[in-house]
Image (cartoon, grey):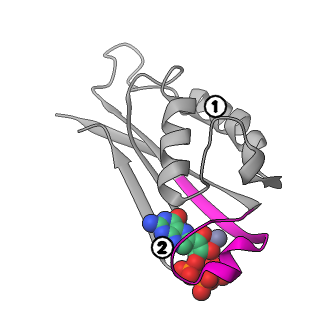
Amino acid sequence: MKFELSQRFFFEAAHTLDRSIDREGSLRVHGHTYWAEISVAGVPDPVTGMVVDLAYIRREIERVRDALDHRFLDDVDGLGPATLEGLCSYLWRQFRPALPHLSRVEVWREASGDRCRLTDD
Ligand SMILES: Nc1nc2c(c(=O)[nH]1)N=C([C@H](O)[C@H](O)COP(=O)(O)OP(=O)(O)OP(=O)(O)O)CN2
Ligand SMILES: [Zn+2]
């Protein structure tokens, strides 16, 4: 049996985006509230009863959130184009070294209903 643990957080950030449709508005600096959820999957350790202590996940979230919250995403090192896809990849790379059980990263914008999910399969 496999268990999946998740934690959710949000950040407010600005960006621009060069795209082939609705280009003008996207090229202007604008902001979004982004929600993100990261998940780890595995089998609980028989001694601790945990796949991973949620406090480790919380600690990593604080670190990564600090790099994104109230930032201009175009300037964030290692992010590239600040799309939902780009943010999922970025979060995966940021969390994976400390959370080897990482199984899923989701980023979405509640206001518009846009969502992207990255999994390890
Ligand atoms: N595949 C993707 N497509 C788009 C992404 C994305 O992350 N992945 N992101 C955007 C934008 O960031 C954009 O601001 C949203 O644009 P749009 O859908 O055109 O929505 P509106 O400009 O009408 O409203 P917002 O207030 O900007 O949400 C576009 N495409
Ligand atoms: Zn946008």
Query: Is any part of residue 10 visible from this angle?
Result: yes
Residue lying at the far front of the rendered structure:
20
- Give the number of the disc on residue 60: 1
Q: Position of residue 25 (x, y in %)?
A: 69, 82
Q: Quadrant of the C terminus?
A: top left
Q: Is residue 86 left or right of residue 27?
A: left
Left or right: 3 in relation to 54: left
Range of magenta residues: 15-36
Q: Is residue 112 visible?
A: no
**Residue 105, position as x, y percentages in the image:** 44, 46
Label 2 secondary element: strand
Residue at mark 2: C-beta within 8 A of ligand 1: yes
Task: Tell me: 44 left or right of 99.
Answer: left
Q: Which mark is residue 114?
A: 2
Judge by depth and name the residue closer to the eye, 62 or 56.
62
**Residue 19 quadrant:** bottom right
29, above or below 10, in the image: below
Tag 1's secondary structure? Answer: helix
| Vertical comparison of 79 with 51: above or below | below
Q: Is residue 28 magenta?
A: yes
